[in-house]
Every structure is written in C-alpha cells, then in structure tokens.
Amino acid sequence: MRTGAFESLTVRVILFSSLWAVLALVVAGGLISTLYARTADRGFEDLISAQLYNLVNSVSVSDKGELQGAPDLGDLRYSRPLSGWYWEVLPASDNTSGRLASASLGTLDVKAASNADVPFDLYYRRQYEAAGLNGEDLFVLETEVVLDADNHAARFRVMGNASVIAGDKAQFDRSLALYLGLVGLGSVVTNALAILFGLKPLTAARRALGNVRNGRAERLEGSFPTEIRPLAAEMNALIDNNRRIVERARTQVGNLAHSLKTPIAVLVNEAGAIGGEHGRLVADQSERMRQQVQHYLDRARVAAQSEGVVFHTPVKAAAERVTRVVAKLNPALDVTATFPATEIVFAGERQDLEEIVGNLMENAGKWARSTVRLTCAAETADRFSLAVEDDGPGLSVEESAAALRRGQRLDEAKPGSGLGLSIVSDIVGEYHGTLSLSRSPDGGLRAQVTLPRTPGPQGA
C-alpha cells in the first residue's frame, strides 16, 4: 500500500517540533524587536529632551532684547554641517530679536510645523517629524520659554536625526534575525537528532519483525526500551500462538489421514474381491474418495500454514526438483525451466509450492507433444509469477473454465482424477494469488499463477 511521508511517525514528530521551535523563535524575535524599538525611541526622545533643557539654560537675553549665549550640548554632531543634528533659538515675542543656531545648521532653516497642525501642550512643548536638509528624517522637539521679567520670550528647537535611529533598529533586526535563524536551525537539527535517536528502538523492532516475516528469525530478538518491551512480548506471544496453531493443524491432518487410510484401503481390497462391474465401480469411487479426502486435507493444511509468519521457500530449488521428476517421467519431452538471476522467495511452505508446480507440470506433460516450459519471473516487489506452457492441443475458453472445476476431466482416456488444476486453484487462492489459463505461443495451454514473495535470507 502506498504511504505518504506524513504518515511516518518520525516525520510528524520532527515536523511538529520544528514548527513549534520556529513559531516560538518568530514570536520571541518579534517581542525582542518591539522592545528594542521602544527602548531606542524612548532613549532618543529622552536625549533630545535633555539637550533641549540644556539649550534653554544656555541662552539668555540682553538688555536690548537680543538673544545671546554660546550653548554647548556636548555632542560633536551639532558642529558637523548637515549632520541631521541641529538646534535653533528664535524670538517668540515682539520685544525679542536675534537668532542662535548650531554650527551644523548655520544659516539654513528647517521648516517648522504650523501651530494649527501641531499645537503646543500645557507646558508649551510640542514634537513632530520634519524633513531634514540632507534627505534625512528629523525628530523635532520645541518649547517656548519666557527668559526674564520683561517677558522676553524665545522658541527653542532641538532636532535629532531619526534616520540614524531607524537604521540602528533595522540593523538590530537583521542581526537578531540572523542569530535567531542560527538558533532555530540548531534547534531543528538537535530536535531531529534527538527524535531519531529516541525512535530508533521502533526501527529496531520493525527490522526484527521483518526478520521474522522473512524467516530469518523465529521471534523478535533484541533489547527494547520499557515502552516497547510489552509490544515485543505480545508479538512474540502471537508468533508462538500461530506456531502452535500450525503444529496442531498438522497433527490433526496427519491423524485424520491415518484414520482414513485403513478404511479406504479395506474398501479397495473388497472391491477387488468382488470383481466384475460392481467391483470396478467401488474401486473407482474408493480411489476418488481417497483423492478427495487428500485434497481437502491438503487444503486444510495450506489454510493453517497461510496464517503463519515465518515461512519462506526459495522458488528455484523447489521448482527444479519438480522439473527433474517430470523430465524423468516424460523422457520423450523437452522439459525446461527458466529463472531470473535474482533469487525469488515464495512466502509460503515448500510443500505448497511443489504441489502447485507439480500439478501444472504433470498436466502439461500429459498433453504436450514435445515441449514443456516453466518460466519464473518477478512481477512486483511482493509478487512473482510461475507460467507452465506446452505445445499440446490447448483449451478453448469454455474448456478452460471447465478445467478449473473440481473432478472435471476433459479426456477420460488420459490418466488422472481431474483434481490437478482445482487443487492448484485452491492452494493459490489460500495465498491470495491468481490462476489464469490462456493459449501459449506454441499453440498449447499456458497456465500462470501469481503468488506472494518475500526478500530472501540475504535480502534478495
């Protein structure tokens, strides 16, 4: 049966644990980035606010109402032209004149927002964003202060380069993504290795079960962890129980065959003593009864054995034995057998395989004129085919259907009971295989069966 990768327990556990690790890192990264951005913005605003107070304390007004002072905010960026860090002091009342500005601003001017757009708060402060002189974004903090008792007032503006802060935040996010990505990758690899190591006993149990299935072992062997040990014990108990069922079925079949052998032999002897037409009738029916009993006993044996889990039979060795016997019984025929280079192993017992091949070869030997061919081939990973062909008269479609009926004989002149193909059909059916009859290239009958296969003892 075709299975998807998601049906694997290992894949599911690794996938879910990896998704959880990635999700956790993404959430953690988002929180860290947000906290850093808030801290950076708050620190930036606090710096601008402190420099604004420093600027206010460094400026005064002369007796003539002119602004005066030499503010030093302690930051060289206010001295570098077009640095994006500026300060400016402007008159805010009619009795005040003059202008003070940082060396970085000089005589240039940064357009202020209108009072209507950004009004002052209760403390005569306001903040807004503005376009810088060199393409940068500025954060502007303003306040208006009365400088003396004569109501000389001035507007103080400190401007900081917001683009620098945005760049710092972007760089932090990139570094954070890189480091968290490495941590995530390491977590996924570590989780995968830990899960693979943790689930390794399941792989060992599957391999041990495969060894039992392929006939390499009779029980699940190995040291299993506490969680799997009960499962291994139950599987071994099931294997032992199956073995007991098979042995009991074999014993019962043997006992039944032995108990019926003597009564049937007595009937055959008595039929010979009677003689005449009645004697031949009784002998013929007794022989038919013996064959029918043997047929059902074999079928019961196959049904019991097909439930086992440890049977395997190399096809080539078993089929060649039967081929040699048929060749000796039919010296006038050219009996050949062809097998693939890779060993094919039948998932069943040797007696059943020999019964199938023997009946097919025997049937072909009865009707062939000169040639009987056996061909074995692998069909799929778990199926193989056996085809027996002859150059006899062959069968029509109606005759092919009749040949599969139990006891049906198409030619009474030929020896046999008519059970050969029926026995093959029953045995093949017990192994969930197929039997088909068609015309061979030589004009005779081609009988093909498909049966289950397993890897050989060496994994063939």
Image (cartoon, rainbow, N blue to C red):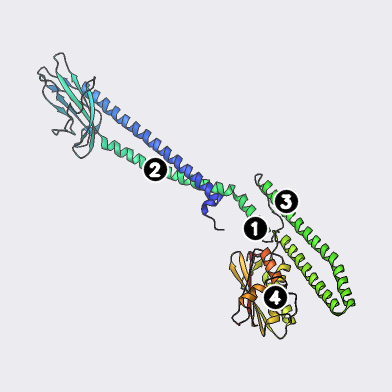
Question: How far is disc 1 from disc 3 in space, using C-alphas?
Answer: 16 Å
Q: Determine the secondary structure under disc 4.
A: helix
Side of 250 where 262 appears, left or right? right
Q: Position of residue 121 (x, y in %)?
A: 23, 22
Badge 2 vs badge 4, beta-carbon distance below 8 Å:
no
Question: How far is disc 3 from disc 4 in space, using C-alphas?
Answer: 36 Å
| Amino acid type shown at disc 2 | Ala
Q: Nearer the viewer, residue 128 or 417?
A: 417
Badge 1 vs badge 4, beta-carbon distance below 8 Å:
no
Q: Nearer the viewer, residue 401 or 196?
A: 401
Within 10 Å of disc 1 (Cα), the crowding (few <14, some 14-19, many 20+) is some
Quadrant of the image for the N terminus?
bottom right
* Mark found first going from the N terminus, 1 or 3: 1
Badge 1 vs badge 3, beta-carbon distance below 8 Å:
no
Residue 237 numbered tag: 3
Residue 399 numbered tag: none
Within 10 Å of disc 3 (Cα), the crowding (few <14, some 14-19, many 20+) is some
Q: Mark 3 or mark 2: which is in front?
A: 3
| Amino acid type shown at disc 1 | Gly
Residue 320 numbered tag: 4
* Mark found first going from the N terminus, 2 or 4: 2
Q: Quadrant of residue 175?
A: top left
Judge whether 397 appears above or below 56 on screen: below
* Mark found first going from the N terminus, 3 or 2: 2
Judge whether 336 appears above or below 155 on screen: below
Q: Position of residue 441 (x, y in %)?
A: 59, 81
Question: How far is disc 3 from disc 2 in space, using C-alphas?
Answer: 55 Å
Within 10 Å of disc 4 (Cα), the crowding (few <14, some 14-19, many 20+) is some
Q: Position of residue 49 (x, y in %)?
A: 26, 26
